Image (spheres, rainbow, N blue to C red):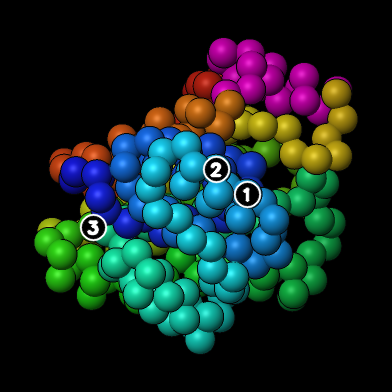
Amino acid sequence: MGLKGKTVLITGAARVGRVVARALAETDMHIALTFRGSKDAAEETAESVRAEFNVRAITVQGDTTDSADIERIVKTVSHELGEPAALVYMASLYNTTPIINPTDEDWQKFYDVHVKGAARLVDALEPGMVEQGGGRVVLFADVAAIKPYAERGWESYLPSKGAVIALTRYLARTRAPHILVNAIAPGPIEPPPGMSQKEIEAAAKDTLLKRWIGAEEIAKTVKFLLETDAITGQCIAVDGGRTIL
């Protein structure tokens, strides 16, 4: 799919989302960033791509687990930038420490954000994508859903990311041939806030490349999956070889 002049909706505007947004703006895509709480980060990203790449960019606050918010987000983006031809669903929850004995709320919150929100947003965007001849969807799983951690306490997080892979394959089959749906399973990208130096070094050692990957590699993969006309239903591990170590 040609990206120039198309609109992409990106959920999750901070950190890696900022790098992805800039990479897609460089292709002359118009950028819509949704956020729940990171307003300053989203607006800063939007302003930077407008100034540097001369594309249109907007921010929309909303909760992707809320149906009314999803409807409002899609209407706002379509009105301001045109119907999105691409969705990059990066909205995610992650705990830097394990959750031992997760509560019902713990279980539900991960599935709501990672699975339900993604599915509902694809449903909302599908008519507009089909009307303009097709679209692309990139979801985000986790490499640990393929090669799980060897410690207790991640049972309310990792299965939800595994469900993202199942959702990717399901959506690819049911939305074909108009919409291509793929997923990325990142390995160590950037150390999250609060991670100790010992933990940072341990995560790097748990890859074949012995280093953190960097958000730029995720952005390259997103761009590839938006441009491809032949790949759908796949989950690409961008992990420095962690899954085969």
Dot 3 or dot 1, earlier in sequence: 1
Q: Is residue 9 left or right of residue 103?
A: left
Q: Identify which residue is drawn at 38% across, 48% down.
A: 55
Q: Amino acid at mark 1?
A: Glu
Count of numbered marks: 3
Dot 2 alpha-carbon crowd within 10 angstroms: few under 14, some 14 to 19, many 20 or more: some
Separation of disc 3 and disc 2 at Cα? Answer: 26 Å
Dot 3 alpha-carbon crowd within 10 angstroms: few under 14, some 14 to 19, many 20 or more: many
Q: Nearer the viewer, mark 3 or mark 2?
A: 2
Which quadrant: the N terminus?
A: top left
Mark 1 — residue? 44
Callout 1 secondary element: helix
Residue 138 can be seen, yes or no: no
Mark 3 — residue? 135
Callout 2 secondary element: helix
Which quadrant: the C terminus?
A: top right
Q: Position of residue 132 (x, y in %)?
A: 15, 64
Mark 2 — residue? 48
